[in-house]
Image (cartoon, rainbow, N blue to C red):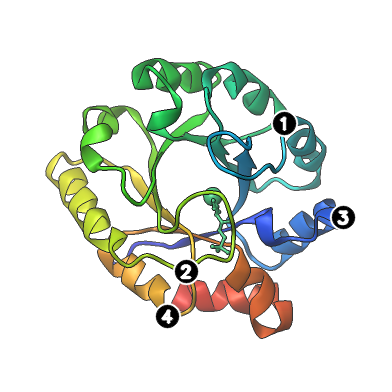
Amino acid sequence: MTVPIKISPSILSADFSKLGDEVVSLEKAGADYIHIDVMDGHFVPNLTIGPEVIKKLRPLTKKIFDVHLMISPVDNFINDFAAAGADIITFHPEATEDISKTIELIRKQNKKVGISLKPKSKIDLIKDHLDKIDLVLIMSVEPGFGGQKFMPEVLEKTKKLKEILNEKKLKVDIEIDGGINFENCSLAKAAGVNIIVSGSTIFKENKGDLKKNIEILRKN
Ligand code: DX5
Ligand code: ZN
């Protein structure tokens, strides 16, 4: 049985001077989700966008806003991102003192819950929460910047996670994020990934032909 693959382009590689147009173009090009990287200059050494920007983008598309929060402490901002129009809210376990509480906060807002594991973060950190979440985001680069090199060592962790989910009969999406290109996307899928995030490849390959790049990432 082949699992349908979803493509979640990261707008971190978009032209920020025309972000609205870029989101509309991604929808037209066949994106399933819109991946929005939120960074605070503290949890990660870079600053990006906040809820106000997401609120302005929200009316432009019906696509799922896949919001990746790289901010700490995360709890104080959950309601703002929910109100701004996030559909999936993903946080890092290191950015909260109480993982269960953060999951609850997101659930209370009727949003899907994701937890993200940095390349060196172990499955053990989240294994007791797998039955309460919708998605695990495996980082295949150190979070903070687009355009970095894929770290193949995370594939083992991905396979292990898929095995655990199968054993527990849990339907949790596995998303991969960082350094994804036309070659390694197939390795990620083989390891159990069903949602592919990509910034540089989608915006820069084939002279920025979004549709073509999304199609290749889906098919390869
Ligand atoms: C990194 C971000 C990623 C990144 C992906 O912290 O979470 O979403 O933008 O960009 P590429 O595909 O260029 O690695
Ligand atoms: Zn991301």
Label 4, label 3: how far apart the Cα atoms are:
30 Å
Report whether 135 appears left or right of 212: left
The first of marks 4 and 3 along the sequence is: 3
Amino acid at the residue labelled 1: Pro
Label 1, label 3: how far apart the Cα atoms are:
17 Å
Q: Which residue is mark 2?
A: 149
Amino acid at the residue labelled 4: Glu
Q: Nearer the viewer, mark 4 or mark 2?
A: 2
Q: Is mark 4 within 8 Å of ligand 1?
A: no
User: Label for residue 183?
Assistant: 4
Label 1, label 4: how far apart the Cα atoms are:
34 Å
Residue 104, position as x, y percentages in the image: 43, 17
Label 2, label 3: how far apart the Cα atoms are:
26 Å
Residue 11, position as x, y percentages in the image: 68, 55
Q: Nearer the viewer, mark 1 or mark 2?
A: 2
Amino acid at the residue labelled 3: Ser
Q: Which residue is mark 1?
A: 51
Residue 49, position as x, y percentages in the image: 72, 40
Classed neighbour count for the residue bearing mark 4: other residues with Cα under 10 Å, few (<14), some (14–19), many (≥20): few
